[in-house]
């Protein structure tokens, strides 16, 4: 029989209070964090690279592999 997934993360005491405080009053990202997000978005939008010859792979080629 399949068992339900147990996440196992229960915050108590000071950890729970800190978590709720961060949710209620989120901190503004630093310049370094924003630059990291911009770089991640840029990488996400780039076409995949073939690791064997460092050439760009057309998305249509990749999609054919999963259909």
Image (cartoon, grey):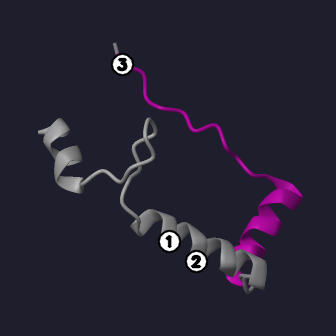
Q: Is residue 19 above or below residue 38?
A: above
At horizontal 43% and vertical 29% (from top left) the residue drawn is 4
Q: Quadrant of residue 53?
A: top left
Task: Answer whether residue 16 is magenta in the image.
Answer: yes
Boundaries of the magenta span: 2-25
- Location of mark 1 (residue): 41
| CA separation in Å, label 1 and label 3 | 38 Å
Q: Quadrant of residue 6?
A: top right
Relative to 17, is 5 above or below?
Answer: above
Q: Measured along the vertical axis of the image, is residue 4 above or below residue 62?
A: above
Question: What label sits on residue 38 in the rendered view?
Answer: 2
- Indicate which disc residue 51 carries: none
Left or right for 40, reference 48: right
Labelled disc at residue 2: 3
Graded by Cα atoms within 10 Å as few (under 14), some (14 to 19) or many (20 or more), the crowding at tag 1 reads few
Q: Nearer the viewer, residue 25 or 32?
A: 32
Q: Residue at x 81, y 67 (%)?
A: 17
Coordinates of residue 46 in the picture (x, y in percent)? 41, 65
Say if mark 3 contacts mark 2, CB within 8 Å.
no
Mark 2–mark 1 contact, CB under 8 Å? yes
């Amino acid at each position: 029989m399949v068992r339900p997934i147990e996440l196992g993360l229960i915050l108590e005491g000071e950890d729970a209070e800190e978590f709720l405080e961060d949710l209620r009053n989120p901190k503004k990202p630093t310049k370094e964090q924003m630059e990291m997000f911009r770089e991640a978005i840029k990488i996400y939008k780039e076409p995949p690279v073939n690791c064997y010859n460092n050439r760009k792979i057309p998305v249509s080629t990749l999609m054919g592999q999963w259909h």
